[in-house]
Amino acid sequence: MSELTDLTAHELADLVQAGETSWVEVTEAHLSRIASVEERVRAFVTTTPDLARQAALHADTAGDPYSPLCGVPGALKDNMATRGIRTTCSSKILGDWKPPYSATVASRLAGAGMALLGKTNMDEFAMGSSTENSGLFVTRNPWNPNHVPGGSSGGSAAAVAAGEAVFALGSDTGGSIRQPAAFCGIVGMKPTYGRVSRYGLVAFGSSLDQIGPLTKDVRDCALVMNVLAGHDPLDATSVPLDVPDYTQALREDVRGLRIGRPTEYYGEGSQPAVRDAVDAALAYFEDRGAEIVEVSLPHTEYALPVYYLLAPSEASSNLARYDGVRYGYRTPGDVDMTEMFLKTRDEGFGPEVKRRIMLGTYALSAGYYDAYYKKAQQVRTLIARDFARAWEQVDVLVTPSVPTVAFEFGAKTENPLEMYLNDLYTIPTNLAGLPAVSVPCGFSAEGLPVGLQVIGRHFAEETLLRVAYTYERGTEWHRARPSG
Amino acid sequence: MANITLEEVAHVALLARLQLTDEEIAHFTPQIDQILGHFLRLQALDTTDVPATSHAIGMTNVFRDDVARPSLSTEEVVANAPDAENGLFIVPRIVGDAPDV
């Protein structure tokens, strides 16, 4: 038997059902794993071992054997509200905020019997691609501690890759699930905008944010999606559509599927190791009967400016609520009201959050609104139309998830624009509200994982899962585990 | 470059209620200038008659019945406040003493 901490949720459930282990034993194995690797990886902001043990014991004694996540130890990104459990967004400004309510995703997972191990580190308010913007500490890539785990859901991705959690949730505003999944060699899905409730997710870019799973394989991704997806009256942007059983989509079959290869995602910007791995994946699909079609998404180059105008604009508005009055940090000392706001926010927010609040405030301010914000919203329409035209020719798009493998700490911190460019292939799907999944598709020469992105039509998560599953069945990348 | 000045950055910081030091303003100004300068390429696109997208799925007007539901207790609402008393948030004084008449 493999180490329990190497296994997926469905593999563990099989062992438990066969009487070979128990959820208590599985949970203890993960808590031990956390104790032994956390000093090196630092994926968790808060751990909740007592809660995990309680849920595991309940799963063993009174659990629902038909709930596939019952007893499974998982983690939540620390921007998802958990009633009574500290929720920080890795920001000093939230202090020791203990939410008086839980995010819908947290309630759904608790209802499904998940054993919550804790809350994971992230770039502050999900603004970043490396966890280097965390206001607390950085998380290290389990494949190589000198490299970033990606971000902003870097703690969630590292926890799963390091065997500390069987699965975790992340949130994705411009790639924050898919990019760390690619950097850490695991599966990460950003569902269609509106597919999963955002209630209780601390808002960053409300028209772009979406919660999704980070898992060790595609079947686990489908199992977690089965719990997350669905309409929530508490989130007016969640969509009242029926939810399929996503595991039914796990079929090894891409015959006749038209796979688009968008020219703009295969330029000089990608590292050779990334290009080679993705080309090999395309050849794999062609071998199995898919048709590869070259398509063009001509406005791709504008996605980055559009995103970095719209997301900071929405953030500058969303983050206005941190004023030191109702929760979180307040500057000490005897100051007047305006000074209290100014100092609280200056002392509570980190540099990247300030930079984005400034960018957004600028783009929304009088005299610049039309030139920046409104223009960006119009170009957002053009980007969405590019995809709509592609769907006339193809069923899915296959691209690299990220132009590079995980970079070293400090490599991009001095130049924010260069850091932003890392999101080039993930951002357009958020702008268009499309679902996309990243799956492991190889390694660079230095042993760092490469991610393959599959993008689909609105609410076509099942097609993505089928393509990803077909790929996974013929490859072994998803079985690789970092040593140590 | 977008030709952003130190004064503009200081003004925007005040609008955003961020008390930036002179060093921070000097640090942010060229970065914001570079980022916005990079974004000026959007101006080259003709967007005449292109509608603005604010919602990717295009949902509008989500309604529900107007019925009262349980809400958080006052105790829970103020539990996280930096300063609270009798179910109220305590904040610095906003208005001065009443003038003598």
Image (tube, grey):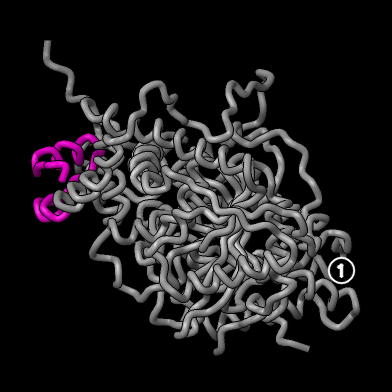
Q: Residues within 10 Å of mark 1 (few under 14, many from 20)?
A: few
Q: Secondary structure at mark 1?
A: helix
For the point 64% across and 21% down, the residue is B63
Q: Is residue A89 left or right of residue A226?
A: left
Task: Judge by depth and name the residue closer to the eye, A131 or A418.
Answer: A418
> Callout 1: residue from which chain?
A
Task: Judge by depth and name the residue closer to the eye, A17 or A53.
Answer: A17
Q: Is residue A353 left or right of residue B62?
A: left
Q: Amino acid at mark 1?
A: Thr
Does residue A455 sit above or below A5 in this rendering? above
Residue occupied by mark 1: A61
Location of the C terminus of chain A (image quadrant): bottom right
In the rendered image, which quarter is residue A220 located in?
A: bottom right
Q: Which residues are magenta?
A: B1-27
Does residue A187 sit above or below A193 in this rendering? below
Q: Position of residue A396 (x, y in %)?
A: 64, 51
